[in-house]
Amino acid sequence: MHFLKLIRFQNLLMIALMQLLFHYAFLKQQPGLVVALSDFQYILLVIATLCIAAGGFVINNIMDQETDRISKPENLVVGKFISEGMAYNIYIGCNIVGVAIGFYLSNLIGKAGFSALFIIIAATLYLYATSLKQSLLIGNLIVALLLSISVIIVGIFDLFPMINDANQAQLSILFRILLDYAVFAFMINFIREIVKDIEDMDGDYNAGMNTLPIAIGKARAAKVAFALAFIPIASLLYYINQNLMGLQFVLLYLLAFVIGPLLYFLIKIWTAKTKLEFRHLSMVLKLILLFGILSILVITLNMHYHG
């Protein structure tokens, strides 16, 4: 149980679900589309992504011991249940497995250069945990960006190697849809990182960090999160109007499970004061992200039904 807490298995489950949905519920359902990876190879890609992400969570837990002791003593694992030395071994092991699988898959599809992606992500996660997270907003941007990359990586490995003159138009549309989801994941996760910083403000302050709420105050940081939440709402409404007006079931789903909760978030963040309220709002954003990702399944089913 403590090991699962160390690698933050709920977050890993979210990444795995995202990648499996985009491959099986979206790409594999496209008529006439041949993807680059077999089922076994794709599972390896998911494992590689999860290993790199788990390594990132472990190094973060190692570096966050001081902060967690104040902010979230119930979440403290390193130094309490798992020794720092053991945590470093797990971190190194996760990265070796992730990078090795990435290297194998990249060579398998004839794109050896793609293996650099896994090394860059692992290095960025290390830099984030050890220094960048202390910089104003840079840490938030990196975490949000890395979640988006776990969506884009599906297109990089599944679609990019298969491009030819005959299917270029179809594949570019599919890649653009993956990119749209990556942007959505980035926006929601970026706002969530700010909300989590507000929640963890006391511990971060004692650890000498310079997060947004420490720099401008809790109330102002909450107003920034409030203002930022208008961007995904406006983007989604525009996207629905442009692409999804004919799919009534998708329309209802997005209004009920994504836009509705975003409006709820807007109302609540405006008056939120306590740590408990910000924790609740962080969970709301996590659910919005989950339901947003699940919409790819709803869209695929709705399109097949119409088809």
Image: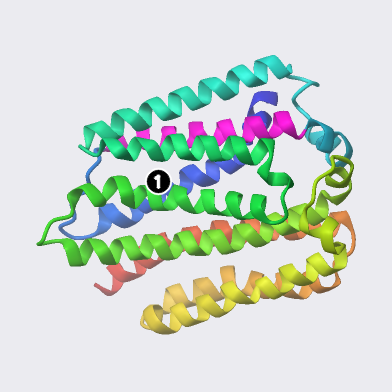
Q: Say what amino acid the circle numbered 1 marks.
A: Leu
Q: Where does label 1 land, which residue?
A: 20
Tell whether position 251 is magenta: no
Q: Residues within 10 Å of mark 1 (few under 14, many from 20)?
A: some
The image shows residue 49, relative to residue 87, as above or below, that is: below
The x and y percentages for residue 52 are 50, 34
The x and y percentages for residue 50 are 49, 35
Q: Quadrant of the N terminus?
A: top right
Overall secondary structure of the magenta section: helix
Tell whether position 54 is magenta: yes
Q: How many marks?
A: 1
Q: Residue furthest left?
A: 166
Q: Quadrant of the C terminus?
A: bottom left
Q: Which residues are magenta?
A: 39-64
Image position of 305 (left or right of 152): left
Image position of 135 (left or right of 166): right
Viewer can see residue 24? no
Name the residue: 22% across, 37% down. 109
- The one nearer the camera, 215 or 60, is 215
**Quarter occupied by residue 264:** bottom right
